[in-house]
Image (cartoon, rainbow, N blue to C red):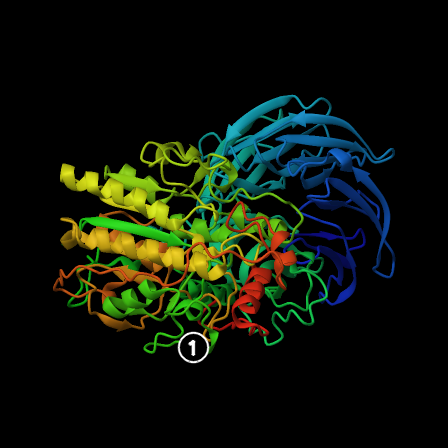
């Protein structure tokens, strides 16, 4: 998450604040060799040495505290004091300590109260909070003016940079910089201009310093001029996009200045790269790009001139041969048990150490970054669709398909459901919910197109529902879900309602509505009424105002105690009305998520009953649509938002997905490598929508899944033999583990634990470990 360099430059401290138990590691600054490590209760972003001392202060994230350490000459951190920000007895999930800054004079510590939209001020002598200043919405980064009299704060949630008095918190200026600003750096070195160009840039003469701000929901860095009297004004924007015309998605989230202040490094998290910018003159110039590992989160030029880039997820995905074994498990995975190779645990962060380079080397690195990019302009060229495909090559192209139905389900891998299909690349020994439990899934795969090489983009539901709806998981989601899933910040706010988590180009329904198309929402981004009414309205609120006007409030959102079959009946009632009115919306999105299951919780429906319920609901929906007057012009897309680390012999991200249409009937097996963003891209092409991010812009459309001729035979659903009301017994081997789980949202549970429970309940044996692969990363 962050780093800090000791007073003498010999040591660099790196903060690990992800899924595993947080820690602070001390490294030799020249080689990054680890010298020592200390675990902490929590840590998140904020870390700084007090001026001219070896005293290190670290913000405690969900622990709502600031920790004080002393770095010894041997490179060891010794814990000293802990300053509570909120008393533990009254602490809530909103009392979260984010960034931390120490005034340049060393007198006071300032901490971002991330969810209180304020700044705590601590006197380090007493360790007491002496002030709390209102600040930006979701204050992310704190940067002090060198005179110690004022500081700047980026508002992750409101898009503003706020300038405040350090004495009383008075807001001196508020200036918009763009959506979701994050890191910022200060440059006060005089610029060196080419001869005769000193005053050519209008309005830039006379500034005393510049502030560079990474604006994560754009492809740019905002540059602000700071005058002698501390007034801020926009100076320029640095475009770090790889191409002149490129959708958003670079996610510039962190910055670093070289020690001579002539180079700015821009960490582009979603591009796996750092941009190199010459800022020695008033006109900044992007010099090139440096490839990094997976999802870089921070950078710093170390003493000696080496550049260090911190990578949130390391080099790639990994195999886990020592994966979940309930007979050897010493602690639940939410406590960070490294012996359990859960997806959040095995994707370990790394640090890249980059030495001196010249223009030739930078040009070579830049070509690598361009080659690795998710998006390239050639992907958007109109070469025409492959022969036999009814999916247009460009948005708005001709297609017989008018209506798109998007069905989102929960948390299954391919082999868990379709491994026993007998055709395609399946492994029957890993199947938990085979043809006896999910007959409609099996029949649909056989009668339409079988996609046996489809991968979800996400690891868990927190990022999964964002990838599924927006073709990206915003920086807020990526940086916060490991803390939540690690069992520290016990709150789930990743599916609408959190401004800092909004994606850069909205959700797919945002773009449908902007295009002027009709749509209908069933269950997405909804807050249920509790308890569930016997009939009628089920939804209390929708966490997106634009979506609310198009939502069926009788269709209940995620609730494992409510049958998916009953949800399907609400949709079928709407379908009858569409037929009577001879008009069905162009885009319909449905969430049926009972295949998530409630594990073996006593009194809850058994896993097989819940998957069978989900299967029957899907069969009912497809049958009804295929018998409607709209069938000849309809395509139904079905996927899981994520696969949740379940068993699959190819990769734990491989998941069942379906494209159901008269134009996919009898298509056979399509083993093309597709992903979540492939499905989004295909729906966008059919509906005439432009891509939302560089990820769906560069994704492979599902052309090969379609045929040119329609087969209008309706689908006949299969009745499930499984009793949908079968309940888990009060006493069963995994009941206690299931009872402890929070089932109120899709991922407030220990996902790895649930996969073990399901395997034990259905197979009465040890579960196999999930598989990691190069191509599924």
Position above or below: 256 against 371: above
Residue 97 percent location from the top left of the image: 69, 40
Instruction: Name the residue carrying label 1.
Output: 428
Position above or below: 583 against 386: above
Q: Can residue 218 be seen in this view?
A: yes
Residue 596 percent location from the top left of the image: 47, 56
Residue count near mark 1 (Cα–Cα under 10 Å), binned few <14, some 14–19, many ≥20 = some
63 vs 267, nearest the viewer:
63
Position of 147 with respect to 484 (left or right) is right
605 vs 463, nearest the viewer:
605
Q: Is residue 85 visible?
A: no
661 vs 259, nearest the viewer:
661
Position of 123 with respect to 195 (left or right) is right
Residue 386 percent location from the top left of the image: 19, 67
**Secondary element type, mark 1:** helix
Q: In which quarter of the image is residue 554?
A: top left
Residue 132 percent location from the top left of the image: 71, 27
The tally of labels here is: 1
Position above or below: 465 against 386: above
Q: Which residue is drawn at 25% across and 50% down?
A: 404
């Amino acid at each position: 998450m962050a780093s800090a360099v000791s007073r003498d430059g010999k040591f660099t401290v790196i903060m690990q604040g992800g899924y595993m138990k947080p820690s602070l590691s001390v490294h030799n600054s020249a080689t990054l060799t680890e010298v020592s490590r200390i675990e902490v209760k929590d840590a998140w972003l904020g870390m700084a040495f007090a001026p001219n001392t070896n005293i290190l202060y670290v913000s405690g994230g969900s622990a709502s505290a600031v920790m004080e350490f002393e770095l010894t000459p041997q490179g060891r951190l010794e814990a000293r004091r802990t300053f509570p920000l909120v008393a533990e007895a009254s602490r809530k999930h909103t009392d979260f300590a984010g960034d931390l800054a120490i005034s340049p004079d060393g007198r006071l510590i300032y901490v971002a109260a991330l969810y209180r939209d304020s700044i705590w001020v601590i006197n380090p002598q007493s360790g007491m909070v002496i002030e709390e200043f209102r600040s930006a919405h979701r204050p992310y980064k704190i940067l002090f003016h060198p005179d110690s009299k004022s500081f700047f704060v980026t508002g992750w949630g409101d898009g503003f940079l706020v300038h405040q008095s350090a004495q009383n918190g008075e807001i001196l200026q508020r200036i918009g910089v763009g959506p979701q600003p994050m890191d910022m750096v200060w440059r006060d070195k005089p610029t060196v201009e080419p001869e005769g160009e000193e005053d050519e840039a209008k309005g830039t003469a006379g500034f005393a310093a510049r502030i560079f701000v990474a604006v994560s929901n754009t492809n740019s860095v905002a540059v602000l001029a700071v005058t002698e009297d501390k007034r801020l004004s926009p100076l320029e924007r640095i475009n770090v996009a790889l191409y002149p015309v490129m959708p958003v998605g670079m996610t510039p989230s962190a910055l670093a200045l070289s020690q001579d202040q002539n180079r700015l490094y821009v960490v582009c998290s979603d591009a796996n790269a750092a941009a190199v910018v010459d800022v020695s003159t008033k006109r900044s110039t992007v010099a090139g790009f440096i490839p990094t590992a997976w999802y870089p989160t921070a950078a710093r030029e170390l003493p000696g001139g080496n550049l260090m880039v911190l990578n949130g997820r390391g080099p790639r995905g990994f195999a886990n041969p020592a994966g979940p074994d309930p007979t050897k498990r010493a602690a639940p995975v939410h406590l960070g048990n490294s012996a359990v190779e859960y997806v959040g645990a095995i994707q370990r962060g790394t640090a890249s150490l980059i030495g001196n380079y010249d223009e030739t080397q930078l040009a070579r690195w830049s070509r690598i970054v361009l080659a690795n990019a998710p998006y390239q302009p050639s992907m958007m060229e109109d070469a025409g669709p492959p022969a036999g495909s009814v999916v247009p090559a460009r948005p708005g192209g001709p297609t017989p398909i008018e209506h798109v139905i998007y069905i989102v389900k929960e948390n299954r891998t391919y082999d868990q459901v379709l491994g026993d299909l007998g055709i395609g690349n399946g492994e029957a020994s890993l199947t938990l919910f085979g043809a006896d439990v999910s007959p409609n899934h099996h029949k649909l795969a056989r009668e339409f197109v079988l996609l046996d090489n489809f991968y979800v983009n996400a690891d868990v539901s927190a990022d999964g529902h964002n990838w599924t709806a927006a073709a990206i998981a915003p920086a807020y989601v990526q940086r916060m879900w490991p803390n939540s899933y690690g069992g520290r910040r016990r709150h789930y706010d990743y599916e609408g309602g959190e401004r800092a988590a909004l994606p850069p180009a909205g959700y797919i329904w945002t773009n449908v509505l902007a295009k002027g198309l009709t749509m209908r929402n069933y269950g997405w981004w909804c807050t249920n009424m509790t308890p569930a009414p016997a009939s009628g309205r089920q939804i209390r609120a929708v966490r997106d105002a634009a979506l609310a006007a198009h939502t069926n409030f009788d269709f209940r959102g995620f609730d494992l105690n409510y049958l998916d079959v009953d949800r399907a009946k609400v949709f079928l009632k709407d379908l009858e009305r569409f037929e009577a009115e001879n008009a069905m919306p162009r885009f319909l999105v449905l969430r049926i998520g009972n295949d998530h299951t409630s594990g073996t919780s006593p009194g809850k429906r058994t896993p097989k009953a819940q998957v069978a319920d989900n299967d029957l609901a899907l069969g009912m929906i497809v049958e009804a649509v295929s018998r409607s007057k709209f069938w000849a012009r309809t395509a139904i897309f079905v996927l899981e938002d994520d696969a949740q680390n379940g068993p699959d012999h190819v990769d734990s991200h491989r998941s069942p997905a379906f494209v159901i249409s008269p134009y996919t009937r009898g298509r056979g097996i399509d083993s093309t490598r597709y992903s979540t963003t492939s499905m989004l891209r295909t729906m966008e092409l059919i509906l005439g929508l432009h891509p939302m991010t560089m990820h769906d812009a560069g994704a492979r459309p599902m052309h090969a899944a379609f045929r040119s001729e329609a087969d209008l035979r309706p689908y006949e659903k299969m009745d499930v033999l499984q009793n949908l009301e079968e309940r888990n017994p009060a006493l069963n081997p995994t009941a206690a583990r299931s009872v402890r789980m929070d089932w109120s949202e899709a991922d407030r549970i220990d996902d790895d634990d649930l996969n073990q429970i399901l395997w034990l309940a259905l197979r009465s044996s040890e579960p196999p470990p999930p598989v990691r692969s190069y191509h599924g990363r």
